[in-house]
Image (tube, coloured by chain):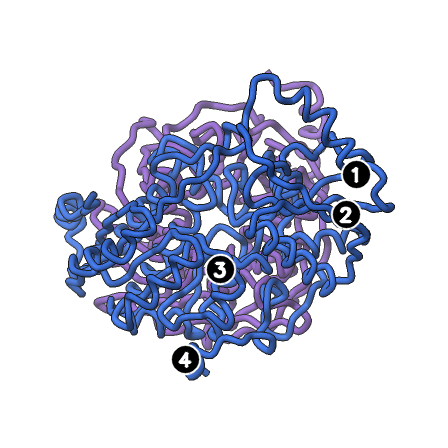
Chain colours: A purple, B blue
Amino acid sequence: MIPLRTLVPMIVTVVLLSATPALANKVFVTNERGNTVTVLDSETWERIDEFPAGNRPRGITISPDGKELYVCASDDDAVRVFDPETYEELHTLPSGPDPELFVLHPSGNPLYIANEDDNLVTVVDVKTRQVLAEVPVGVEPEGMAIHPDGGYFINTSETTNMAHFIDAESYEITHNILVDQRPRYAEFTTDGKKLYVSAEIGGTVSVIDTSGEEPEIIRKIGFEVPNVLPEWLQPVGVKASKDGSRIFVALGPANRVAVIDGATDEVMDYLLVGQRVWQMAFTPGEEFLITTNGNSNDVSIIDVKAEKVVRSVQVGEQPWGVVVAPN
Amino acid sequence: MKLTRSLLVAILVTFFGAPAALALDVGTAILRIERTLPLPISRLDLPPADLGFAGGRLGIEDNQTTGRFIGVDFTMETRSVPPEEAAAALDELRANQNRLIIVMADDETLAALADHAGEDVLLFNATARDEALRNDECRANVLHVVPSRAMLADAVMQFLVWKKWARMFLIFGSHPEDHLLADAYRSSAEKFGINVVEEREFVDTGGARRTDSGHVQVQRQIPVFTQRAKEHDIVLAADEADVFAAYLPYHVWDARPVAGSAGLRAVTWHSAHEAWGATQFQRRFERLAGRPMREEDYQVWLATRVIGEAVTRTGKSDPSAIRAYALSEKFELAAFKGQKLTFRDWNGQLRQPILLTNRHTTVSVSPQDGFLHQNSPLDTLGADRPESTCRAFEGATR
């Protein structure tokens, strides 16, 4: 049953959606401390709703058809699956303990989940809700990415300081690439030829060439912002534009998002956003990039073309993850 | 106790099919010097039998997970001996091919061990806090992972400045280490502009530490001991011997907070700390040891991870290569404190944020905001390069 307080904003949303169907998408933001998901409208940037999402919700993603919303409820040791329309919880998925981040196969199934507490990556079939595999990796697995062709996936382990390359068929580790301290996030370019891995404490993003026989680090991107202590330049979330021309890196307590030229991998600019910027998501047409700002309880909206922050929107307590519903 | 993990490694290597690129064996050891100490005031502070060793075990497990991917096998041997057997135990560990040795000892024993060990061994100081060992008495073959008293004192003092609690009532114990800690508080107070308005010594008259319903007398004695002190904002206790500080909160004559050896304490670690991914680290330790992590465990873990990082990044295991890498600008270590830890190349001291805890939560973390430094804010804690009288590290790097 849909609670009444949810219904009213939903009706508003429906009206908005029908007015400009191509532009408005729902934006889902997990609030780590608030134990909720805030729903925003990507056209008006109004808050549509907020619903309970389990204990300590962090990683969030949505199925390619937009029918299922997946939330890592870290303190519940489960992935909760919600209906993105009604916000009703449909079921949970077995995730292993303390799930933090995950990635969906491009086809929408399976889901690859990092279990920080158990040094495992758990692979779950989202239809049958069965665990397909548990892959032992390094200490404190965190970042997850899948190659666009779906053939292999990446896990980063925070204390082992490696990016593990894992075959999606055999679940065997094929390569281990040592990066800098505390790797948090991995992101492929759409063509699958480059992989970006952020190292939070190392303060760098490693650029890994994945086009050859063996993956290799071809560059390490460092950061420098006047009047910001180098210790606070801590890269976390990374997003690459579809054409690969721009890479955006969230710099945590530096309260900046770095804009990187995808061709040269040089930093071009730093955009001032909210406090402790963590994860990011594009709108489907890449008009906007949304950043979660954990210490200021808001999200910043970046106009991608202009490379400017256009507004900030208050969400719940300590926003962590963000995903935008597909068109 | 040989904590070799080669069987597990063998299984894992088979599983991962990982290329054993380096085929390197790294022998590390923990040498713990037993001291006969009086019982702590609180039974919560009774030392567990595996104090420090459990931290080492976790460190080796962490190192092994990286090592197995690149063909490095880390092993760890442990010894717990009285001071008079320290040198013999060190010789034995060295004879077993352990040349990276983590030492849990008092300052005097550590200095003697360093002189005895010579150049082909690298020692990691996990517990000795004297300033002298970092200055005039420094040894080239010792890296300090444990902070000095000055670093801990500065961590507290910066917080007092932030709170604008500028008038301090210093109460120190009668043991030599209490006097050293009181000295550290006085120097730190002067450095940060805190006034020591009153000082009193609490003399240890011996006797049993814990008695049934002892709190009845404590409740009468401490107010009397602390009455008629000059106007102050905070009581600072220097009581490393653990004789009286725990009795001060709530019992002091004036309604003032307590810091130092009780109340707000400066520590490298405590088991309530959760920030910067520490929760998973605490849980991993608790699963392994069946108890919460102590400072000593964290410090030994740190030393083990310093070794792990240096070996993994250099592909070498000899003490001189490890030392050179640790002191170089390339070295960095993530240790659940929100920023990378590095070494001071002028005396081999590890830089690290210091937690301020009330034993229940993390109250704050020093260095405090606004304490700036031309190299690293972490160098606002403890003696800085220009003040150093250590000469054994000259020509190390830079």
Between marks 3 and 4, how big is the CA–CA gap?
A: 25 Å
Residue B57 relative to residue A15: left or right: left
Mark 2 in CB contact with mark 1 (< 8 angstroms): yes
User: Which residue corresponds to the image point at 49% horizontal and 60% vertical from the top-left?
Assistant: A201
Q: Which amino acid does label 1 sit on?
A: Arg
Q: Name above or below for residue B383 compared with residue A3.
A: below
- Which of discs 2 and 1 lies nearer the camera? The answer is 2
Label 4 or label 2, whichever lies nearer to me, is 2
Residue to which mark 3 is pinned: A201
Residue identified by numbered label 2: B169
Residue type pointed to by label 3: Ile
Specify which label sits upstream in the sequence, 2 or 1: 2
Q: Earlier in the sequence, mark 4 or mark 1?
A: 1
Which corner quadrant of the image does residue B48 belong to?
top left
Tags 4 and 1 in contact by the CB under 8 Å rule? Answer: no
Provide the chain ID for the residue under circle 3.
A
**Where is residue B350 drawn, in percent x and y?**
48, 63
- Residue under the image location 75 percent in, 35 percent down: B225
Amino acid found under the numbered disc labelled 2: Phe
Three-letter code for the amino acid on which mark 4 is drawn: Ala
- Toward the viewer: B382 or B370? B382
